[in-house]
Amino acid sequence: MMSIFSALILLVSVAAHAKIDIQPDTLYPKVEFDTSMGKIVVELDRTRAPRTVDNFLTYVVKGDYDNTLFHRVISEFVVQGGGLNPKLEELPAMDPVINESGNGLSNGLGTIAMARDNDPHSATRQFYFNVADNKKLDPSKRRWGYAVFGEVMEGMDVLEAMSLVPTENNQTLNWPDFPVTPIVLKKATLLPR
């Protein structure tokens, strides 16, 4: 007879190996961001950025964006988040995703794109919203761009309000453009089909 402890171990093991449902057959999945400043809904474009969308949705479905900060806010440029918790700790990331910036989507006002380092294929979990037309972030003949993978469908007013919050140089991280009052992504939810 299986002990209660053995049954719990088996249940945890099965749950750990369960497949995460990121709606692989949905071409335009929607995600709701419940932030400390209001809600934003984005529609993602799997037809143009399939790897990026799958990467992003994996973080969403696993709850890895819940209770994270928008840590970089530059008015008339970007609102960036997804990588820090409220204790200002960087969060673990999966393997980087291949840069899909040549997909025809532009870093226009109200789009969502992947943040990355200088290495064009270094994007992992951090993302940003464009709060202006940032075509200079698009690819050119001589350089990689930043991969756009969706656009805001609802809550543009919330995003605009976020872009106007006062910022400072965060002394702990030595990062500029850090909101004086934290902007928290309380929960990111993949909406039903």
Image (spheres, rainbow, N blue to C red):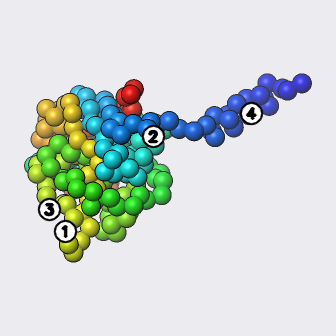
> Nearer the observer, disc 3 or disc 4?
3
Describe the element under mark 3 as helix, strand or loop: helix
Q: Are marks 3 and 2 in contact (CB under 8 Å)?
A: no
Residue for point 27% across, 36% down: 42
Q: Earlier in the sequence, mark 4 or mark 1?
A: 4
Residue where numbered disc 2 is placed:
24
Q: Residue furthest bottom?
A: 142
Which of the 4 image quarters holds residue 17? top right
Q: Is residue 119 above or below residue 13?
A: below
Residue 49 vs residue 92, the one in the foreground: 49
Name the amino acid type tagged 1.
Ser
Q: Nearer the viewer, mark 3 or mark 2?
A: 2
At numbered mark 1, what does the secondary structure look like: helix, strand or loop?
A: loop
Mark 4 to mark 2: distance in Å?
A: 27 Å
Mark positioned earlier in the residue sequence (1 or 2): 2
**Which residue is the site of mark 4?**
10
Judge from the rendering whether residue 85 lies leftward or rightward of residue 135; answer left or right. right
Count residues near mark 1 (Cα–Cα under 10 Å), then give few for <14, some for 14-19, many for 20+. few
Q: CA distance from mark 3 to mark 2?
A: 31 Å
Residue 178, percent across and down?
23, 49
* Helix, strand or loop at mark 4: helix
Mark 3 surroundings: few (<14), some (14-19) or many (≥20) residues within 10 A:
few
The residue indicated by pointer 1 is: 140
Residue 184's spot in the image, x, y percent?
30, 36
Q: CA distance from mark 1 to mark 2?
A: 30 Å
The residue carrying mark 3 is 136
State the residue at coordinates (85%, 26%): 2
In the rendered structure, find residue 9 and report the number of the disc placed on it: none
Earlier residue among tags 3 and 4: 4
Q: CA distance from mark 4 to mark 1?
A: 52 Å
